[in-house]
Image (spheres, rainbow, N blue to C red):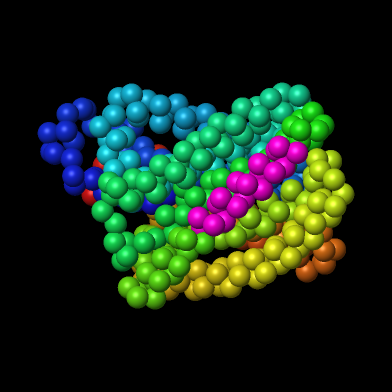
Amino acid sequence: MATYAQPRHLPARTRTARPVTPLRWLGPNWYAAVMGTAIVASAGLALPRPIPRPAAVAVWALSAAALAVLLAGRTLHWRRHRDQARAHLLDPAVAPFYGCLSMALLAVGGGTLVAGRDLIGTRAAVAVDAVLFTAGTLTGLLAAAAVPYLMTTRHQVTASGATPVWLLPVVAPMVSAAQGPLLLPHLPAGQWREAMLLGSYALFGLSLLATLLMLPMIFGRLLLHGPLPLALTPTLFLVLGPLGQSSTAVNALADVAPGAIGPAYSSAFAAFAVVYGVPVMGFALLWLAFAGAMVVRAARQGMRFSMTWWGFTFPVGTCVTGAAGLARHTGLAAFGWLAVALFGFLLTAWAVAALRTLRGLFSGALLAAPR
């Protein structure tokens, strides 16, 4: 989602060894557009009064097509521009975006079961989601371990360089925790379902604790070093991702717990969904107000469109599904209204980001060599 410059640690001869094509500058940040599109379908159907299913199916199909095209493009990128691909891994501004690959796979996979089944049938939807869930979870765990390792051993990072982008690799397992409940009812009863339930809670804990390590550094950087650069200001919305996704996860897991584990634990999980979800949603609203004020400030100072604007979509979408889950478990209409209001913001942000991205693609500006 971020704009980034050519890594300086590569010699000039390496940077110009291959013909310069737009594909050379196709980074992992582009997966954010797939995530932001897929969440529109899933969040729309999670509302107390869902959006029309044909509209959700159309948006899901668009996200699936975008994922297929992007996977093909990134595969060619690794084959034809391996030097640049390796440079991305060694660039602390780009490497965290490898977490977006996992989340794109998971978001489209979950959308397949929620919306895509109307188009391809439930049996095929389960098979597709199983493949994408497995691939997304494995790549997410790899990113959650590898990117912090690279940041520690290979990247040159400073306290003033901390940004919400650092959250992307460690949030990916939380998306798996939220998507696992969709597959659980399709697994054999007994050990398989219990393993999926408790495994999803393990992914929830892994991501939550890693996020709690990162957040103080990010907020400390803002307090001590001031606002982010204008182009990176939209990434403040990324903090909503682990907040909304964790609330979504505990509510979704509580929904399926009775079919996977005994009543004593399933009732405890239902209580935990509310006890955890309500305070976290409160903090998410506080951060939304803070991030929104910072974006307004940046816009007044001349912030222009970049791929970071996709940060307005997926994180907000997770808050929609989180609020909708709390509406189910508490019966409180206020959470339903909150979900609808957030979805309105999500839909507007997605439309603006999608139109500006298409314009940038047709003009060639978004795939031009970084300056």
Give the x, y percent position of residue 2: 38, 51
Q: Hey, which residue is sitting farthest right in the picture?
A: 263
> Left or right of 194: which side holds 351?
left
Image quarter for residue 176?
top right
Q: 281 or 205: nearer the eye?
A: 205
- Magenta residues, as a range? 194-211
The answer, for residue 146, to whether it is visible in the render is yes
Give the x, y percent position of residue 185: 79, 35
Image quarter for residue 337?
bottom right
Residue at x 82% of width, y 63% of height: 330
Give yes or no for residue 248 being in the magenta stretch.
no
Q: 120 or 161: nearer the eye?
A: 161
Residue at x 50% of width, y 55% of height: 210
256 vs 325: above or below: above
Residue at x 37% of width, y 46% of height: 149
Give the x, y percent position of residue 38: 61, 42
Q: 8 or 139: nearer the eye?
A: 139
211 vs 257: above or below: below
Instruction: Kindly report the secondary structure that dominates the magenta region of the rendered protein.
Output: helix
Q: Disc count in the image? A: 0
Residue at x 26% of width, y 42% of height: 369
The answer, for residue 355, to whether it is visible in the render is no
Give yes or no for residue 202 being in the magenta stretch.
yes
130 vs 45: above or below: above
> Left or right of 169: which side holds 15?
left
